[in-house]
Image: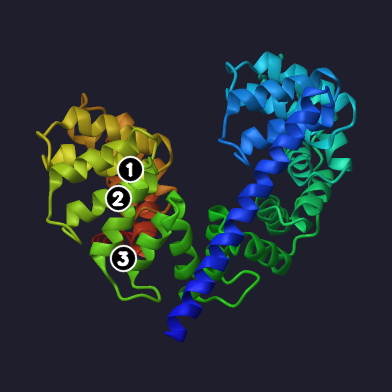
Amino acid sequence: MNKLLKRMMVALLSLGLAQAVWANDVLDFQETLQVAEQGNAKAQFSLGKMYYEGQGVRQDYAEAARWYIKAAEQGYPVAQNNLGTMYAKGQGVRQDPVQAEQWFGKAAEQGLANAQYNLGVMYHNGQGVRQDYTQAVQWFGKAAEQGIAEAQFSLGKMYYEGQGVRQDYAEAARWYLKAAEQGDPVAQNNLGVAYTKGQGVRQDPVQAEQWYRKAAEQGYAQAQYNLGVMYDDGRGVRQDYTQAVQWFGKAAEQGHAQAQFNLGVMYEKGQSVRKDYVEAVKWYRKAAEQGLANAQFNLGNMYANGQGVHQDYAQAVQWYRKAAEQGYAQAQFNLGNMYANGQGVRQDYAQAVQWCRKAAEQGLANAQYNLGVAYANGQGVRQDLVQAEQWYRKAAEQGFAEAQYNLGVMYAKGEGVRKNYKIANEWFGKACNNGLQQSCDVYRVFNQAGY
């Protein structure tokens, strides 16, 4: 019984304390309302804030805006800034960026740092005013000098990109540092990038890793990815694939496409994780669905090879096409091959040549070789030995052995070029040196013949 009484007393005491807090809130609201109705600007602002936050009263944005207006019209800068925010967001009032800019401006002119930052944002984005990077820099600068971390970061970014000011990596790094030291994760990450690339600071991978880590530990996905890259490459830290997987995983879970791709690669290769094609496919797909071309290409490969999924040439073609249409050369080449072989699509040499040409024009040697073959055989294009020689040469000059051999054959036979056994043998020799046994056999015969 005594135990039960004790529990009841504790419960009643807790209930009484909770009621007392609520009663005080109501009391504070009534007192604030009374003073506000007498025209006191500070009380009007406080009342607006109570309505905005639902403190001591039911949350009501319209009432919050009404009281902010009263205080703002008396020149109360914090109310002016908060009213600007409500117009910017359409809270309690019709969304109106022009009104937002005007109220931010009134507070900013009085030196309110948050309003100066907000006004900088309006000028930067062209909201409520004509976009003006110079004005944005001016207002970000005023807020930054007062220690507003978001303004310091924004000012650093404008120096980095040369928006409204002359591009200056040193100034960018200086402002990033100020924001980073206040714990701004984006600034910490960008400072890490500066140390990685040596932009505005001396290149220092150790410093880069430290700043990436600060941002990564706050959950910033880009920094988690960057930290994963450092562990993957062994820059600024000892190479550690386990750590790389960990940080890529954190970023990937937040939807970071490149981290998802990298995680897929590690599962495909079995780097510090058990090789798992199903997991690789899962992460490639997530990145591919976000439009990442290299993930789309790799997912196409997985379907083409039946790794982690049932082999499906039609699906392979679909993903190759997505990457190819983004200009991914290897995907263009693979898509061309699918058309040439009739895998997943109807065989179509003209389409094969079209995609192969796109890859060849980007300098992909195997595509240049295939295009040479197409012109030599007249597949998908009118036969043209001169064009064949030109494309073979482009691939051959990159060390592509089959192209070097075919070029040698063309010089030996005088096809598309003037016959020249000496030049032919030079190309046979190059192909032989690149491991093509067929070319070694021909090269030996030509040497015996004195060429």
Point out which mark residue 285 bears: 2
Q: Amino acid at mark 2?
A: Arg
Q: Who's the residue at 80% across and 32% down the image?
A: 43
Q: Who's the residue at 57% across and 16% down the image?
A: 94
Q: Amino acid at mark 3?
A: Glu
Which marked residue is nearer to the observer: mark 1 or mark 3?
1
Question: In the shown orientation, is residue 66 left or right of residue 225?
Answer: right
Q: Classify mark 1: helix, strand or loop.
A: helix
> For mark 1, does the 10 Å Cα neighbourhood hold few (<14), some (14 to 19), or many (20 or more) residues?
some
N-terminal of the two: label 1 or label 3?
A: 3
Question: In the shown orientation, is residue 345 left or right of residue 197?
Answer: left
Point out which mark residue 289 bears: 1
> For mark 2, does the 10 Å Cα neighbourhood hold few (<14), some (14 to 19), or many (20 or more) residues?
many
Point out which mark residue 253 bears: none
Label 1, label 3: how far apart the Cα atoms are = 18 Å
Q: Classify mark 3: helix, strand or loop.
A: helix
Q: Amino acid at mark 1?
A: Glu
Q: Classify mark 2: helix, strand or loop.
A: helix
Disc 1 and disc 3 in contact, CB within 8 angstroms: no
Disc 1 and disc 2 in contact, CB within 8 angstroms: yes
